Image (cartoon, rainbow, N blue to C red):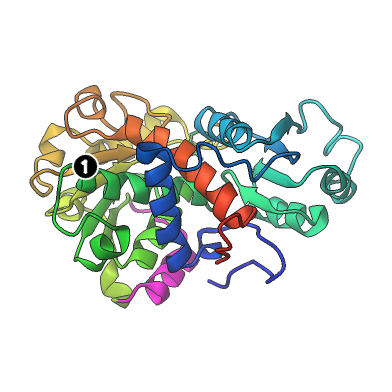
Amino acid sequence: MTSTNKPSTRHVLTDADLSRATRLALLRTAFSAKHEGRLAAARPLAGRHAAIVMAKPSLRTRVSFTVAVHRLGGHTIEVGAHNTKLGKGEALEEWAAVLGRMVDLVVARVHAQAELDALAAHAQVPVVNALSDLWHPCQGLADAMTVWEAARLAGRPHAHDPAAFFEQPHRWAYVGDGNNVLHSLLWTAADLGVEIRAACPAGFEPDPAVVEAARSHHPRGAGGVVLLHDPREAVEGAEVVYTDTWISMGEESSKRPEDIEAVFAPYRVDAALLARAAEGAIFLHCLPATPGVECTTEVLRGPASRVLDQAENRLWTAMALLSDVVFDAQGGLP
Ligand code: CP
Ligand code: NVA
C-alpha cells in the first residue's frame, strides 16, 4: 500500500502514513505523556483550531481528539452534515476548501475512505482519519501502545523500549469480523513485525487488498499475516486476543443480528477460547462492545482485559500524534 501522504502534508489517512520509526517514536511520546507527564506543559497547538467531523457516532475518538487539542493549547469546533449543509446543498469540494481556510487541522470520521481522501485534497490542511470503512489508524496506534504498555508495566523482558520490545517475536490474534479495525491491526502488526493470525467467518474476511499490502509490508511476508477460519487455531499461543463488534456502524441495515449470531457464534471470545492463548495473554477490544455478543461479559471485564487502558490510550496517542507528527513539535516527520 502506497502512502497517501505528499511530502508537504501531514495527513494521517491510513496506517501507512506512519512509518515504523514514527510509530515507535509516537509510542514513546504517548507512554511518557501518560506516565511521566511529558507534554503536560507543551502548547504546540496554541492559537490553532481543529475541526472535528463525525459522520458517525463516537465516544473515544471524539473525546480523545477534543481533549488532546485542548490539552495542547488549541481549540475545537464540531462540524458535519448534522449542523451544516454538507451533502444537502453544499458539495464536499467547497465545504472542505472553506473549512481548510479557517482551521489548521481536520479530524474526520467518514463513511467511505474516498470521502476522506477528497476532504484532504480540498481542505489543504492536515487531515487525520478518525475511522472510515477501511481504516482506523488512530486505533491501531493505541492498540500497539496498550500491548507494549502492558508488557512494560508487567516488567517483561525487553519492554523498556518499544523498538526493543517489537524486535522480539510476538503473536497476536484477532477473532471476528474482517473490518476496518482488523485492517489497521493487520497493518500495525506488519509494520512492527508481529505475527498476526486472524480468524473470520467465510464471507467476512478482511479486504484482500489490505491483506496483500500487510503481507508485502511484513518482514515475514505471508507467514506474518495469517488468515484462518478457526478461532481456536488463531488464538493458540497468542499474547493478545482482539475482537470487535460483529456489526459495524453503517452495516445495521445489511446485517440482521439473528443472521450474524448464527454465523459468528463460534467466534465469540469466551473464557474457554481465551484459555487457549499464551499464559498472561491480554484481551483487547476497540470498543464500543456488546457484552455477551462478540465477547462474554466475563472476558470483557475480566482480569485479562485491557480495554479501558486501550480506550484511555486513544487520548495519549492522539496527543503524541498531534504534537509530534501533525504539528511536528519534535521535528519528527514520518
Ligand atoms: N474505538 C473507537 O473508535 O470508539 P468510538 O467509536 O467511540 O470513537
Ligand atoms: N468496526 C467498528 C469500529 C468502531 C470503533 C465500526 O466501524 O463501527
Question: Would you call the spot at circle 1 few (<14 residues within 10 Å), some (14-19), or many (20 or more)?
Answer: few
| Residue 76 image offset from top left, x and y in percent | 71, 32
**Which residues are drawn in magenta?**
202-219
**Quadrant of res 23:** bottom left
Of residues 331 and 10, which is closer to you in this image? Answer: 331
| Residue 126 image offset from top left, x and y in percent | 70, 54
Residue beneath disc 1: 153
| Residue 316 image offset from top left, x and y in percent | 46, 40
Q: Residue furthest front?
A: 41
Quadrant placement of the C terminus: bottom right
Residue for point 37% across, 45% down: 31
Is residue 167 shown to the viewer in this render?
Answer: yes
Residue for point 24% across, 27% down: 296
Is residue 136 shown to the viewer in this render?
Answer: no
The verdict on label 1 being within 8 Å of ligand 1 is no
| Residue 11 image offset from top left, x and y in percent | 65, 58
User: Up-down: is 155 above or below 51?
Assistant: below
> Is residue 217 magenta-colored?
yes
Q: Is residue 186 left or right of residue 90?
A: left
Disc 1 marks a residue whose amino acid type is: Leu
User: Up-down: is 196 above or below 86?
Assistant: below
User: Up-down: is 299 above or below 208?
Assistant: above
Residue for point 15% across, 49% down: 232
> Is residue 4 magenta-colored?
no
Number of disc labels: 1
Quick one: SS at disc 1? helix
